[in-house]
Image (cartoon, coloured by chain):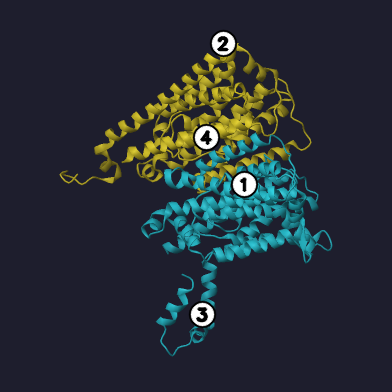
């Protein structure tokens, strides 16, 4: 699809005209101001909000201490945030598809529990278990998608129920924090290459994956299902298959998040999941993805995911009671959602005018 | 329709032709699932008592009723919210905060309860109002609003607690759990009283009629002259107040409240409504069904230790219960529409 586009474009063009000539015409002075106005109105300004909040927090964090703007500090923060970023990738896809995934936290708990119990001393056994976990989690996500797409139950009910199932299963296999993580695996998660930590490399890899993913047909289908299932269906988008794939990907990314999480915790934690449910939604919503589906992307989610981590650090640096963190997070979520509602309102008013 | 002398005026008129028929179909389906829920509750109880000595003893039945009353009361609020087309995920920390603040404000004494309980109920009203305004007026999705509210209440509770410690429950509150009037614990009598009020409100008041209308379709309800916003706000207020009451009673049961004590009641409240036959899409369901749901879940919770299964298994069972019952109800609704 991608490679076909420029060719048809070239065929449609008069033979003598060169592509650059058309390009320079669009970017004339009037075109520029038009683009700017359009950009402001298109809600792209809203996409900047998480980056602005993030910048303010970074400045606040750096103002109290010297020498914080280093690669090392980036390594530490990314190390703390990568679990959330990974789980939020799946959440982004699900929310753009018009659903919500409350079960990824439970799946995260379950995978950390099983991994910590069965990774053994590393080596071949670890890789087999890891492969099984990745396949199993993707299948578990696909079950969510199947129940939502085929039976027509609401996403939040299905994933609320499966989160109870996954969380319960996690407690069943591992009643309290425990198990071991092979040294090989935790060294990988905490290692560095060229002075840059593994988490940052993984994040770059994920960003690259996103840049490719957003050019795929699947991403287009996810967005159209999120905008309107009926319109998507009438336009020939395989709605059920798209929903199943979306939730399967969310399961996959919850598993990857868990596999990364255990390199940091060095043990399985069967009750860690619930705290990631809300924060992943905060990350996605702060990142500018519309809760009603159809609009958004992973770019803003990255900024949105760093914000809760940074708030925790800023609270610590400024000597504020850490009890305030939960309250601030909740208020932040509602603030982010209000921004979201406001954006939707502006879009509606523009289309009405 | 084409033979009618006058064109139908408004949506109500066009639907009037098959309304009785549809109402009958809905009522029939609803009653069938409620009867089914009671049948499951009784069957589970009978089968379990046949294999477990002492399960059907009066003391144990009393224990079951006490445990059921907590699920029953949080389920009451959840029933109203779900009928109205929403869901309340802020129950856990409203319940927990109510219990902990109760012991701190009263200092473990009976005397201050006269003003402490009204204060707690007012706090519940406040939480419900904020939820309701966010959802009905600002248009925030119920899941997000109440999930956020749960964390806000949790955070506020942590800030309020600071270095304070939750103390023991006042003796009077403990008494409500462990002493009886006639054959029933006071706690269960309070539940029964609330159940009667809820049933009357749903079945025989204009509020109830309007609530079902709002849950079925907000737009149709608005065009039929229902003031939608106050009805929706009211459901969240009812839910938060019910959670606050459950928190007070549950504190008497556990004697020493603790953070996170409300967490199981999120799944339990939704599961109770689901087992009670509501498809969780709004506009249908009844509290009479939720009562059966609370009984089923309580027997289930008591069954698991007998089968040597741990709390993890209980969560799995809750989850599967929600899935199976909602799937059944959804399929039924779909068949009803065809």
Q: Which mark is residue B228?
A: none
Residue that label 4 marks: B320
Q: At 51% across and 64% down in the image, what residue appears?
A: A216
Q: Pick out the residue farthest to the bottom.
A: A16
Q: Pick out the residue farthest to the top.
A: B182
Q: At 43% across and 42% down in the image, what residue appears?
A: B228
Rendered view: A326 above or below B167 = below
Please report whichever mark, 2 or 4, sits nearer to the chain's N-terminal start.
2
Residue that label 3 marks: A31
Q: Residues within 10 Å of mark 2 (few under 14, many from 20)?
A: few
Q: Chain of mark 3?
A: A
Chain B, which colour? yellow
Q: Chain of mark 2?
A: B
* Quadrant location, the C terminus of chain A: bottom left
Whether residue B309 is visible here, answered yes or no, is yes
The nearer-to-camera label among 1 and 2 is: 2
Residue that label 2 marks: B58
Rendered view: A313 above or below A177 = below
Residue that label 1 marks: A278
Instruction: Kindly indicate which chain is depicted in cyan in the rendered structure.
Output: A
Q: Residues within 10 Å of mark 4 (few under 14, many from 20)?
A: some
Q: Are marks 1 and 4 in contact (CB under 8 Å)?
A: no
For mark 4, give the secondary structure. Answer: helix
The answer as to whether the residues below labels 2 and 4 share one chain is yes
The nearer-to-camera label among 3 and 4 is: 4
Rendered view: A136 above or below B105 = below
Q: What is the C-alpha distance between the residues marked 1 and 2?
A: 43 Å
Q: Nearer the viewer, residue A65 or A94?
A: A94
């Amino acid at each position: 699809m991608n490679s076909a586009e420029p060719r048809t474009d070239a065929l449609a063009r008069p033979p003598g005209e060169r592509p650059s000539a058309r390009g320079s015409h669009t970017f004339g002075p009037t075109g520029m101001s038009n683009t700017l106005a359009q950009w402001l109105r298109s809600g792209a300004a809203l996409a900047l909000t998480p980056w602005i909040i993030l910048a303010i927090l970074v400045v606040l964090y750096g103002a109290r201490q010297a020498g914080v703007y280093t690669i090392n500090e980036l390594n530490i923060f990314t190390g703390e945030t990568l679990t959330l970023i990974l789980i939020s990738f799946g959440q982004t896809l699900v929310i753009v598809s018009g659903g919500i995934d409350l079960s990824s936290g439970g799946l995260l708990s379950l995978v950390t529990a099983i991994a910590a119990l069965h990774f053994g001393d590393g080596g071949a056994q670890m890789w087999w278990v890891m492969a099984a976990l990745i396949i199993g989690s993707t299948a578990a996500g696909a079950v969510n998608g199947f129940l939502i797409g085929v039976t027509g139950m609401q996403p939040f009910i299905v994933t609320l129920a499966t989160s109870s199932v996954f969380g319960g299963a996690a407690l069943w296999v591992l009643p309290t924090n425990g198990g071991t993580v092979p040294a090989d695996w935790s060294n990988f998660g905490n290692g560095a290459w060229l002075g840059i930590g593994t988490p940052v490399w993984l994040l770059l890899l994920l960003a690259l994956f996103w840049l490719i993913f957003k050019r795929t047909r699947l991403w287009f289908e996810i967005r159209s299902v999120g905008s309107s299932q009926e319109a998507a269906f009438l336009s020939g988008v395989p709605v059920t298959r798209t929903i199943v794939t979306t939730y399967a990907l969310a399961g996959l990314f919850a598993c990857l998040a868990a596999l990364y999480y255990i390199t940091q915790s060095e043990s399985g934690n069967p009750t860690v999941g619930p705290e990631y449910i809300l924060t992943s939604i905060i990350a996605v919503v702060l990142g500018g993805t519309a809760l009603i589906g159809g609009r958004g992307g992973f770019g803003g989610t990255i900024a949105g995911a760093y914000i809760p981590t940074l708030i925790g650090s800023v609270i610590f640096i400024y000597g504020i009671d850490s009890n305030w963190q939960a309250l601030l997070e909740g208020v932040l979520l509602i603030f982010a959602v209000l921004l979201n509602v406001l954006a939707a309102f502006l879009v509606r008013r523009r289309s009405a005018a | 329709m084409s033979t009618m002398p006058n064109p139908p005026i408004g949506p109500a008129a066009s639907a009037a032709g098959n309304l009785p028929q549809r109402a009958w179909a809905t009522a029939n389906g609803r009653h069938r699932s409620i009867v089914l829920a009671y049948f499951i509750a009784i069957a589970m109880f009978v089968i379990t008592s046949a294999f477990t000595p002492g399960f059907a003893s009066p003391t144990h039945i009393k224990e079951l009723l006490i445990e059921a009353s907590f699920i029953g009361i949080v389920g009451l609020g959840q029933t109203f919210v779900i009928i109205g087309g929403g869901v309340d995920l802020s129950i856990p920390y409203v319940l927990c905060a109510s219990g902990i603040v109760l012991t701190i404000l009263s200092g473990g004494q009976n005397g201050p309860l006269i003003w402490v309980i009204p204060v707690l109920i007012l706090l519940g009203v406040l939480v419900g109002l904020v939820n309701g305004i966010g959802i009905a007026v600002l248009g925030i999705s119920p899941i997000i609003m109440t999930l956020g509210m749960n964390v806000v209440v949790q955070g506020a509770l942590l800030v309020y607690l600071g270095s304070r410690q939750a103390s023991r429950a006042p003796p009077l509150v403990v008494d409500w759990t462990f002493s009886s009037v006639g054959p029933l614990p006071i706690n269960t009598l309070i539940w029964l009283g609330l159940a009667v009020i809820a049933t009357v409100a749903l079945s025989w008041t204009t509020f109830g009629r309007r609530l079902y209308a709002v849950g079925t379709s907000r737009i149709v309800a608005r065009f039929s002259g229902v003031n939608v916003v106050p009805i929706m706000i009211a459901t969240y207020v009812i839910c938060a107040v019910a959670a606050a009451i459950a928190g007070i009673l549950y504190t008497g049961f556990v004697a020493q409240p603790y953070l996170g004590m409300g967490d199981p009641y999120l799944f339990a409240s939704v599961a109770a409504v689901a087992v009670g036959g509501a498809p969780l899409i709004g506009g249908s369901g009844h509290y009479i069904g939720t009562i059966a749901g609370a009984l089923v879940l309580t027997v289930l919770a008591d069954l698991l230790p007998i089968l040597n299964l741990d709390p993890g298994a209980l969560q799995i069972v809750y989850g599967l219960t929600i899935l199976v019952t909602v799937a059944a109800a959804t399929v039924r609704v779909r068949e009803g529409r065809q």
